[in-house]
């Protein structure tokens, strides 16, 4: 039956073959049904057995009768399919496990070999690696504690500047400490650029500064300025390395920049650079008149005359108590920085001299060098040229040893001195003298290698712990391990120290996280002590009280360490510690 659509479209002629087939089928089913039935019977007839034709030749389709097995049930078919699928899955899982194990072993071996080659120390000092660790302080953002969004800081800055590197203060200090103990690192070079773009707190500056001072020439047993390290008896072992040099270069230095730069052994200011030592300062904004103009009334609950944080919303100028507080804190920080700079640079400045320097305004490189604030004023950053110089000297020494060992040592010394003299003419003797590094390594690279070394050591300790467990369960395993030189003795249990950081304003979210962590630390019997690191100006009264109440339940010793600030609620929670340690520039109270 043709459809109406076919008639409308005029496609009748296109379906003639369909009509022919359908007509044939209908004719066969209606006129000759017996033919179809007979055909089905013949087609479905089983083969005849030879026993049905005794004494006669059986027809071609006659065969011996064979009993047919009953068809499998649906449950049996499902079980067979499931068993086959399970077998295939197990085989695939086994191959995948072997492949994953092989990849992990390859990665472990590669990482271990990379770490081994990087930190390997040649017994012959003449063949030992000579590296300089470069600190990009102009593109460095120093924070107390990193966050998941810290990677956003690696985006390029304005004007095509280099990407910003976000690093925790603890990580930076640890990198400098490790560099001081690394015999392959001979010097430290800090690039301040046109000044530190991301302000660093005074407390963090002091901690970094102390690490740089420990790097400078204090080898074997370092004199740590932080009383916490003195209590622990910490030392820095450089493996008998010689004196190490540190350099700071910048196009301009401000008060906080120079406070850090002065801790380096040599300070270089670009020949056309500027030095602006104006002292510590504090800036406050008062919004009281503006809010009154729009009819906004701010209700503040505070206790005491020196609780000045809410003054920004209520006052139009400094109150006498507020001004006294600001002058006291800035004067204290200013005196601390002056004393630190004078000590590092061996300056004999009195209070009058410092006042004249601050009142003088911006100083040129020549003025700064004249009074001893800097050591040299190169035209450009000298690091790349110094590396080229030392590489030429190393190449000259290698050619002398390999190609012409009979060459006069005096002639070789003359060639080296010519290379040095050429560099000294360009940058000055103060810049070139003592620089021996032939390879520069960035802070990111060094941090990455330290992290990889820590992973390798942790992985090795984990494997050793598992082997000891197997040895304790089986005497035969212990004997086999001992035959291979593995000490299967009992592992010495070490006490743990937990570190809890309270960073930023104290609110409900930070209090919840801190309270939860404190409960886990309190219930962990392997933790014997808590170090409470506080870098906070305070915050919510209720949140600070919640943290304090949780600390009251502690039966373990608590030691508090303060960062840039531990004020108001930050000091409130720090008071629960048996010992409180702070930097000289920490704001607290």
Image (cartoon, helix red, strand yellow):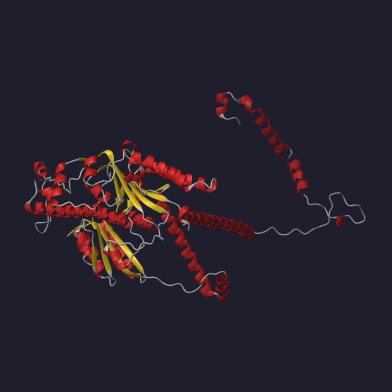
Q: Report the side of 474 relative to 133 (left or right).
A: right
Q: Residue at x 33, y 51 (%)?
A: 246
Count of marks overlaid on the render: 0
Quadrant assignment for the C terminus: bottom left
Q: Where is residue 258 in the image (x, y as percent from the top left)?
A: 24, 48
In this view, the residue farthest toward the bottom is 475
Q: Report the side of 102 relative to 288 (left or right).
A: right
Quadrant assignment for the N terminus: top right
| Residue 149 can be seen, yes or no | no
Q: In this view, does 464 lie above or below 435?
A: below
Q: Position of residue 74 (x, y in %)?
A: 63, 58
Q: Which residue is drawn at 81% across and 52% down?
A: 47
Q: Report the side of 69 relative to 574 (left or right).
A: right
In this view, the residue farthest toward the right is 55
Q: Report the side of 589 relative to 93 (left or right).
A: left
Q: Position of residue 446 (x, y in %)?
A: 40, 52
Tell me which corner region of the image, top left, top right, bottom left or bottom right, holds residue 87: bottom right
In this view, the residue farthest toward the left is 320
Tell me which corner region of the image, top left, top right, bottom left or bottom right, holds residue 305: bottom left
Q: Which of 435 and 97 is in front in this view?
A: 435
Q: Is residue 334 above or below residue 487?
A: above
Q: Position of residue 577 (x, y in %)?
A: 24, 67
Tell me which corner region of the image, top left, top right, bottom left or bottom right, holds residue 14: top right
Q: Nearer the viewer, residue 284 or 5?
A: 284
| Residue 183 can be seen, yes or no | yes
């Amino acid at each position: 039956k043709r459809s109406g659509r076919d008639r409308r479209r005029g496609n009748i002629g296109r379906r003639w073959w369909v009509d022919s087939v359908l007509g044939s089928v209908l004719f066969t089913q209606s006129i000759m049904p017996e033919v179809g039935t007979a055909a089905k019977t013949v087609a479905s007839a089983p083969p005849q057995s030879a026993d049905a034709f005794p004494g006669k030749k059986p027809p071609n389709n006659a065969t011996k009768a064979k009993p047919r097995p009953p068809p499998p049930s649906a449950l049996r078919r499902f079980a067979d399919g499931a068993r086959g699928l399970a077998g295939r899955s197990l085989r695939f899982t086994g191959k995948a496990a072997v492949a994953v194990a092989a990849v992990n072993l390859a990665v472990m071996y590669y990482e271990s070999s990379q770490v081994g080659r990087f930190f390997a120390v040649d017994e012959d000092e003449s063949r030992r690696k000579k590296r300089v660790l470069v600190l990009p302080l102009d593109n460095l953002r120093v924070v107390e504690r990193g966050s998941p969004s810290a990677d956003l800081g690696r985006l390029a800055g304005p004007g095509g500047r280099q990407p910003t590197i976000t690093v925790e203060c603890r990580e930076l200090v640890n990198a400098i400490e490790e560099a001081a103990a690394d015999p392959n690192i001979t010097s430290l070079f800090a690039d301040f650029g046109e000044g530190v773009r991301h302000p660093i707190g005074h407390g963090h500056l002091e901690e970094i500064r102390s690490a740089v001072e420990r790097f400078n020439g204090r080898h074997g047993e370092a004199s740590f300025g932080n009383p916490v390290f003195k209590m622990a008896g910490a030392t820095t072992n450089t493996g008998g390395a010689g004196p190490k040099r540190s350099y700071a270069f910048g196009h301009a230095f401000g008060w906080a920049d120079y406070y850090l730069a002065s801790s380096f052994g040599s300070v270089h200011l670009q020949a056309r650079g500027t030095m602006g030592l104006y002292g510590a300062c504090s800036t406050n904004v008062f919004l009281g008149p503006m809010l009154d103009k729009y009819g906004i009334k701010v209700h503040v609950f505070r206790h005491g005359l020196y609780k000045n944080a809410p003054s920004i919303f209520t006052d139009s100028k400094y109150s006498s108590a507020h001004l006294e507080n600001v002058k006291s804190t800035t004067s204290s920080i200013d005196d601390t920085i002056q004393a630190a700079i004078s000590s590092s640079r061996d300056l004999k400045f009195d209070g009058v001299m410092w006042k004249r320097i601050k009142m003088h305004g911006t100083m040129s490189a020549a003025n700064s060098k004249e009074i001893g604030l800097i050591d040299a004023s190169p035209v450009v950053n000298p690091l790349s040229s110094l590396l080229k110089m030392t590489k030429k000297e190393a190449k000259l020494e290698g050619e002398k040893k390999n190609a012409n060992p009979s060459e006069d040592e005096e002639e070789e010394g003359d060639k080296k001195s010519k290379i040095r003299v050429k560099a000294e003419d360009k940058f000055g003797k103060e810049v070139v003298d003592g620089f021996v590094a032939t390879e520069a390594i960035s802070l990111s690279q060094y941090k990455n290698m330290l992290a990889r070394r820590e992973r390798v050591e942790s992985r090795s300790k984990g494997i050793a712990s598992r082997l000891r467990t197997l040895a304790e369960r089986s005497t035969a395993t212990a004997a086999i391990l001992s035959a291979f030189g593995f000490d299967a003795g009992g592992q010495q249990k070490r006490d743990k120290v937990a570190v809890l950081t309270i960073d930023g304003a104290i609110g409900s979210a930070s209090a919840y996280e801190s309270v939860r962590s404190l409960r886990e630390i309190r219930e962990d019997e392997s933790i014997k002590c808590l170090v409470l690191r506080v870098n906070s100006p305070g915050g919510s009264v209720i949140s600070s009280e919640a943290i304090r109440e949780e600390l009251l339940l502690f039966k373990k010793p608590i030691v508090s360490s303060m960062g840039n600030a531990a004020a108001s609620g930050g000091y409130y929670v720090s008071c629960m510690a048996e010992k409180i340690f702070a930097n000289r520039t920490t704001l607290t109270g």
